[in-house]
Structures are given as C-alpha cells and as structure tokens.
Amino acid sequence: MSKKNWPLWEVFIRSKQGLNHKHVGSLHATNAEMAIENARDVYTRRKEGVSIWVVESVHISASNPDASDELFEPATDKVYRHPTFYDLPDEVKHM
Amino acid sequence: MTDAKQLSLEDNFQAKVDAEIKIEPKDWMPEKYRKTLIRQISQHAHSEIVGMLPEGNWITRAPSLRRKLGLLAKVQDEAGHGLYLYSACETLGIERDTLLDQLHTGKAKYSSIFNYPTTTWADIGAIGWLVDGAAIMNQVPICRCSYGPYARAMVRVCKEESFHQRQGFEILLTLSKGTDEQRAMLQDAVNRWWWPSVMMFGPSDKDSPNTAQSMKWKIKRFTNDDLRQKFVDVCVGQAEILGVTLPDPDLKYNEETGHWDFGTINWDEFWQVVKGNGPCNRQRLNARKKAHEEGAWVREAAMAYAEKQEQCEVASVAKVA
C-alpha cells in the first residue's frame, strides 16, 4: 500500500470582522475543504475566528532571511517618508 | 563551510538569542539547537496525544453530564495541543510521519506520567489538579522560548490549560465535600499522583546535563529543580483547601528559604518508568499503534478521494474549454 502523506496547509484566521487574517499554524489535510474543517476544530475551538483561509504550504514563497539586509535596505535611509521629517510651526497644531 | 564562517554564524545566532530576538524556521540555527528542539517539541506533542488515553478511560463513566462535557472538551484540547506542537515541530524540517514513527517505535519519549493508570474517578480530578498544574508550571516559561513557532504554540496551549486545571480541582473539591468514602477516594488519588507529578519536572539539575545549553539558548528559562520547587510551594496551600494530606512526611516550611522542603524523590521509579517499565507503558504504546494502524485505510481513502475529485475537476474544465 502506498504511504502517501496528506499535504501540509498553512492556516490564517480572521479573529473578528474588520481585522486581517493572521497566520496561526499549519495542519495536514487531503484538500482545501478538509483543511478548513480541520482548521475550525484545531484553531477555533473557543471562537477565535470568524473566517478561515487555508493555502497549501508548497505554494508559499518566502523571502530569504539571510538576505534581509539587502532586501529591506532601500527603506533604511529614507527618513523623509515619515511625517516627523517635516518642520512645521507650532501654530499648525495637529497635522 | 569554513570553521571561521561557522563560528561567526554561531556568534550571530547567540547574539540574537541574547537580545531576545526570536528564531524563525528559515533562520540559520546550529544543528544541535534544531535537534534539541525537535526532540523536546515532539516529546511534548507525543505527551499531549498519549495523555488523552488515561483520561479517555473515564469519558463514558463520568458521574454527570456536566463532568462528561468538561472531560470531553479537555481531551479534545489535548488532541489540539498535540496538533499545534506537531505543526511547530514540522517547521524544523521533519515530517509528521517520521515523528509518529519515532513515537511508535519507542525512539521518542513522552511524559512518563501517562504511564500510570486511572483507576478511580478521583484520578481524573487529580490529573487536572496535579498533572496539568505541573504542566502549566513547565509550559508558561516556554511561551518565551527563543524558537518562534514553539513559543506561539505554547501561548495557545497555556490559554487552554487553565480550564483543565480548574475542572480537575472542582472535581476534587466536590469529592472533598462528599461522603467519607468519597473523601477516601480523593486522598487515595492524591497519594498515587503526588510523587509522579513531582517527577514530571525531570531529573534533578545535577543529573540534567543538557540544561545549561538549553538555558543559554533560551529554550528553557528555569531549571527542573526551580520549577519543581515552585510547584510544591503552590500545591501545599491548595491541598489544604481540599483537606488532603500530601504523601510526604518530610514536607515542611523552611523559614530561611521561604520555600517548602520536601522528601527524596524515588529516582529508581522515575528511570524505570522512563525505560518502559511503568505500569502502563506497553498498554499506552499499543493503544497508539493500534489507532494509527487501524486508521490507515481512512487516511488512504481520503487521499484517494481527494485525488479523484481533482481529476474530475480537471476533466470538467477540459470539457468546457
């Protein structure tokens, strides 16, 4: 008999309406439908969610943590992208 | 890799750990860190799964519907905890099947506490109070473990554990207010579960050679003996509320240290159970293997069904095109 593992799925849960889905962990299932049902039992036994996303782990591409410095370097020297870079007189109060 | 490069990678890694920066799955880590974590997390996951067996024994015999609901929910949580932990463990590059094989062949261990039998209903209360109490003591610091996926899984586990301990304590409290016979049953359960629970923290620090490395890597935050002492200290007061005696004649408050001194642990018994000679080792492992083997056809059928569905979809898409 073939010994074939069920694929691995990553699970994302929206904890309440208005918030984004957040990664919570993974599980094994034969297809998306089963992955959602299993995710409900494993990750939302106490009303932790109102919506579930599942995606097969093999479909996720990730940036390389060893190359993080180069990857994010463009953002490190651009203080002018932040509001505090701009000098305004106190009279303006809130802006 | 040159030795110099390896060394700088290790220094870098340790600097991150020292700065309390979490290590994530794809980050570089020493091989020994990875192996230690795989061993610890899988052992933890196996304990959750095997831990369902002694309690499952009482689901059909719970004394009321309320108790049955509570116990069922607790056992279901244990399954969930096992799954969070297997999933965390798999991020280290090991397959679920390999982990299960290691459990079934005896290569991987699980907590020895589950090799003791649950002979009365009071045992279910004692497990909740003492075994889950000890587990919480152990697990809370792991929420700050340096390995991100393990720490995050533990946050979930700990949130759910306190219900487990409270349901156990309530069972015992009810017995403590019952008949003489019920009080005797309560005391008997505490007599049998106390020492194995104290042993749950593992060997004494002087016999735990890996502790120093695990503390340096911030996998562990406290030593076995420190956690054990904390556990004994909190249990004394709780035992008084239940009106039970903890079965240790040497238990006494030490004014100087502010802690409760306790008697010598029977390490022979501890190692016997670890080595597979506890009262239920074979029974537990056989039950796990049987469940796994008898479920094989379900896993295969589900996979075959999913594959067939996928082929049908491909075929119907082709027809439309």
Image: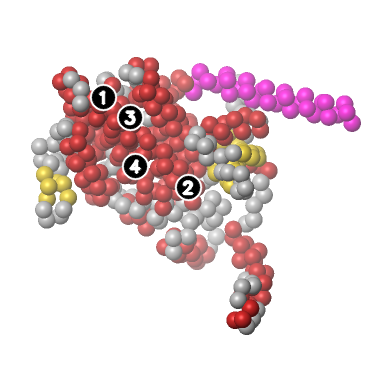
The CA span between labels 2 and 3 is: 25 Å
Find disc 4 in the rendering and name its residue: B136
Density class for disc 3 (Cα within 10 Å; few <14, some 14-19, many ≥20) is many
Badge 3: chain ID: B
Find disc 2 in the rendering and name its residue: B152
Q: Are marks 2 and 1 on the same chain?
A: yes
Q: On the rendered structure, is B60 left or right of A19?
A: left
Find disc 1 in the rendering and name its residue: B122
Badge 2: chain ID: B
* Residue type for callout 3: Phe
First-in-chain label (2 vs 1): 1
Q: Quadrant of the N terminus of chain B?
A: bottom right
Based on the picture, tell me whether residue B125 belongs to the magenta stretch: no
Find disc 3 in the rendering and name its residue: B114
Magenta span of residues: B292-321
* Residue type for callout 4: Ile
Badge 4: chain ID: B
Residue B239 vs B309, above or below: the answer is below
Q: Are marks 4 and 2 in contact (CB under 8 Å)?
A: no
**Where on the picture, by quarter, is residue B238?**
top left
The CA span between labels 4 and 2 is: 15 Å
Residue B220 vs B131, above or below: the answer is below
